[in-house]
Image (cartoon, rainbow, N blue to C red):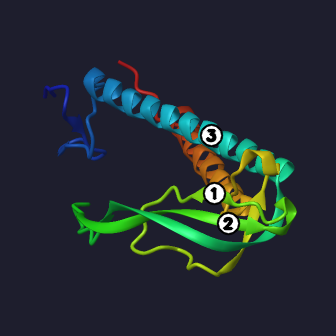
Amino acid sequence: MSYNTYERMADDGDAFYRGKGPSVYDPDESSRKEAALNCCFVFAIFLVLIGTWQTVRARNLQISTTREHCTIVGRDDTNCYYDCACDTDNVCLQCPGVESTYSINTEKCDDAELLSKATQCLPRPQYRIGDVVQCFVPNCDEGTVYLGSPNQDYFAAMLCLALGGLITCFGLVYKCFQPVVSV
């Protein structure tokens, strides 16, 4: 009885067993898996680099600024569009929004007017004129203020670092413990 390379004899010796996967080493499949694994490692390295950059950025923000209570004294809005109403295929509508530049006064700078520009297109302005908000103020000479929180940057950094670490671990486990095929 002869067998071709894709068939193996079952334990009872009579029946043919067609395996659940290829029983012969397939170099094309191996190279595709290797390419996908390398892409995962590159993505993981990218996430770790972004996480490290976010951590340094948040730390520098904490060092170079002081937390203050700022009063919004003016707002200049710019029209923009943002993705909204996305469906399961990630096809999104473009909804009109606003990107705001805020004029802010704070006691630290003797009520000098500082500017802060929102980096996001939002459905509506985040703050109203007269709102007192927490802000982070660098040297008054810079003329800018940061309305976010370093904790937001730390959260983004830790999320990137954790995802990058997980992808790396899963990739290493897959690479180290994949079945060995002899030809």
What amino acid is found at the position of numbered circle 2 in the picture? Ile
Asked if the residue at tag 1 contacts the one at tag 2, i.e. Cβ–Cβ closer than 8 Å, the answer is yes
Residue appearing at x 62%, y 36% in the figure: 49
Tell me, for residue 48, which label it has, or none.
3
Element on which disc 1 rests: strand
Q: Earlier in the sequence, mark 2 or mark 1?
A: 2
Residue type, label 1 = Leu
Closer to the camera: disc 3 or disc 2? 2
Residue 104 bears which disc, if any?
A: 2
* Front residue of 53 and 22: 53
Residue 167 position, x and y percent, is 55, 45
Disc number at residue 115? Answer: 1
Q: Residue at x 76, y 60 (%)?
A: 112
Callout 3: 10 Å neighbours few (<14), some, many (20+)? many
Assess disc 2: are there few (<14), some (14-19) or many (≥20) residues with their C-alpha within 10 Å of its C-alpha. Answer: many
- Quadrant in the picture for residue 155: bottom right
> Marks 2/1: CA distance?
6 Å
Q: Position of residue 103 (x, y in %)?
A: 62, 64
- Kindly identify the residue that appears in the image at 53 percent across and 74 percent down: 126
As drawn, 18 above or below 176: below
Q: Quadrant of the C terminus?
A: top left
Residue 39 appears at what percent x and percent y?
Answer: 43, 32
Vertical relation: 3 (above or below) 15? above
The secondary structure type at the circle numbered 3 is helix
Q: In this rendered view, identify the residue nearer to me: 103 or 176.
A: 103
Q: Which mark is residue 29?
A: none
